[in-house]
Amino acid sequence: MRKRKVLLLLGCLAAAFVPLTERVDGLRVGSKKFTESVILGELVALTAQEAGVDMLHARELGGTRIVYEALLAGEIDVYPEYTGTLTQEIFAGERIDDLGALRERLLKDGIIMSARLGFNNGYALGMLAERAHALGIETVSDLAGHTDLVLGFGNEFMDRQDGWPALQRIYGLPQQSVSGMDHDLAYRQLSLGVIDVMEVYTTDAGIRYHNIKLLRDDREHFSLYEAVLLYRADLDKREPRLVRGMLALTEKISAVDMLAMNSAAQLERIPEREVAARFLAEALSLEVAPKVETRLLRLKKYTLEHLAMVRLSFLLAILCGLPLGILAAKKRRLGQVVLALVGMIQTIPALALLVILIQPAAFLGLGGVGSGSAAAIAALFLYSLLPIVRNTCEGLRDISPDLSEAALALGLPPAARLFEVELPLASRTILAGLKTAAILNIGFATLGALIGAGGYGQPILTGIRLDDSALILEGALPSALLALLAQGLFEILDRVLIPAGLRLPPAD
Amino acid sequence: MFILKGVSRSFGAVLALERVNLTVESGKTTVLIGPSGCGKSTLLRLMLGLLAPTSGGLEFEGAPITPANAPALRQRMGYVVQGGGLFPHLTARENVALLARHLGWSRECTEARTRELALLARIEDDIWDRYPREISGGQGQRVALVRALMLDPEVLLLDEPLGALDPLVRADLQEGLAQVFSTLKKTVVLVTHDLGEAAFFGHTLVLMQGGRIVQEGSLKELQETPADPFVTRFLEAQGRLVV
């Protein structure tokens, strides 16, 4: 019996250290989690492939902050960005007057900005082409003459300094009926005629889909959001072929091209990689055969990434959670503090926790973003602590005083009391805690995709972005299955680890 | 064996024991008796060093009992908690052998000692591989007794050993215990609230009430020269059972 348990534990430990995912120590291009950024990331990855350079695309890493920090930390080597985002978001509050100044500012961070890729993806106001034509509206100034138009803007645009408040002031727009709403919802409202005017990004696929006319910004209010590539200054030395290859993209992608690519990916559901490959063939006469990923291969990759995250974080949670739970049970005062702390961690929203952890992970030289992300593993570890610590503590506290006293009176040393008597008696409660933690962990791990850690969350995120239910299920189903599997595994573990004498019905 | 001098113990504001003086003689059976809440179980725990006195001092074989030496001293005492306190996750055999295994006894040595005690306590052979939940209350108490006697302790302390058993088992076990005590010639301290039991086992009865010792002596002494009206009342309330 004893031997079996030891073997089982050793087996688990060994299994925990078998590497599941290949670590790519080579080059990485990052992208933000919207279609255009992913397509641009694929373009860079394909030019790298064409130049004979091994490069991984860390897709959909998250928002601007995450991706920029990842570039600074050297987690990624290059990613597509917009000049307006840099001046308005990254360097908000610093005075940067023109592109030259921006270039210099970036160089101070050790980052080079490429020439423009060729298109501007800034804000613009849009109306249904038909309606604009009927009212004779061509420019934003023309709106001033139509007081009864209904305006609907994304919530972010309503609040931004360069958004609605400034627009209203500069153009003297008189409309009374202005409301904030979800950006995607605004498209629907516009096509239904509920609103007349909305803000769009100039290369949104929706523009083509809904046949929207962009109103000319005749007073040049909106900042330019020129697409550029940002890359680390040392990249030129490390991989000159790559830099030459990807810079071939500059001045080659027009707004029409980008709009067409966005539509192909978003509306026709053509994989981004293929969209990018087609563009390279047509515009640059580069024939790159994108490596095709079958659904099965994809699933295998997601599964391995997911397991890698869950496994390491869960193992660490057990290694820390059990001693903490024991400590909490033995020292009441300290126990309160420990339980309060791990409880508090549980209340931090997942995304916030992930973002908070990226910096320390990078500081420690661990992978902050991307597959095998230390930040994701640390977050999962923290989330798994509560059930383990609490159940261990409660299991130990619930031991009948008679039995604790018997162990004490028998003269067993403290360590023997703990391992021979107390832990076995509390085993059922402790294992229940582990089971809860494992299932929570598997579910939470889908959020790792928010910072590019991959796993089943990846297809879920992409599916949400592309409004593709099949893709969402591709992540959600295996994740649910894995949770069920974990549940089953723990039922078996119960039989092995809970002593036989405790599984008998209590004597009358 | 035990010498208690002015021992008091309080739990918060409640005084459970008040200036208790008691000497437990070697080779004798001393019975602590009294109504529930009189402090008899607390007194037993103090002797085991499971509790420290609030004031006063205890000695075991001439050495003061301190929190530091209590764990070592406890290996020289055998204790049967109320209800037996057998560990439900271990078989009867494992329960009995637990401490011996920790002290590095050989398997043969442990087995031999178990057989010897099993014979004495009249335990059937077929229960050794069963778990406590599969054993009757009376047999469980016998196993607990064997566990307490395993290391051949100098003193045996028992808290209500016949507590929750039905009358027939009780009578049988009472005989068994008495036989074990007399064969092994151990010093025994036994807690009970039952005068019949006390009279059956005890050389010395220590009658307690409200955290104090009211009188100490043989049953005869308690009957003939009661130190307090309470003694007579207590004896009369239960005395009908004693001939």
Image (spheres, coloured by chain):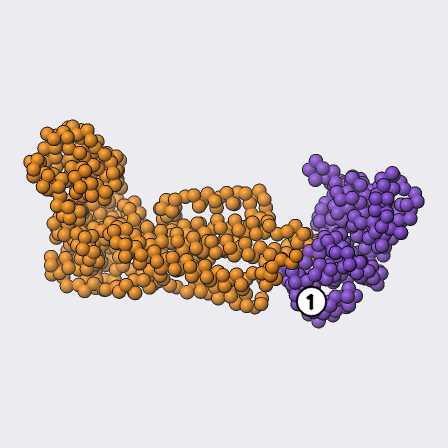
Chain colours: A orange, B purple
Q: Residues within 10 Å of mark 1 (few under 14, many from 20)?
A: some
Type of amino acid at the residue the image marks with label 1: Ile
Kindly identify which residue carries mark 1: B127
Instruction: Tell me if residue A446 comes above or below residue A214 in the rendering.
Output: below
Q: Is residue A143 left or right of residue B207?
A: left
Identified at 19% across, 60% down, the residue is A274
Q: Quadrant of residue B89?
A: bottom right
Instruction: Tell me if residue A501 comes above or below residue B243 in the rendering.
Output: below
Pick out the residue farthest to the bottom: B108
Q: Nearer the viewer, residue A503 or A260?
A: A503
Q: Is residue A482 left or right of residue A173?
A: right
Identified at 28% across, 51% down, the residue is A464
Residue B240 in the image: state x and y as whole percent: 86, 48
Is any atom of residue A21 visible in this view? yes
Residue A452 in the image: state x and y as whole percent: 32, 53
Q: Quadrant of residue B75?
A: bottom right
Q: Is residue B103 left or right of residue B174?
A: left
Q: Nearer the viewer, residue B12 or A134?
A: A134
As helix, strand or loop, the secondary structure at mark 1 comes to helix
Residue A82 in the image: state x and y as whole percent: 20, 45
Identified at 14% across, 40% down, the residue is A126
Identified at 16% across, 28% down, the residue is A174
Instruction: Tell me if residue B33 comes above or below residue B132 in the rendering.
Output: above
Q: What is the tally of numbered marks visible in this picture?
A: 1
**Chain letter for mark 1:** B
Is any atom of residue A203 visible in this view? no
Residue A377 in the image: state x and y as whole percent: 40, 53
Q: Is residue A163 left or right of residue A499?
A: left
Q: Nearer the viewer, residue A5 or A76?
A: A5
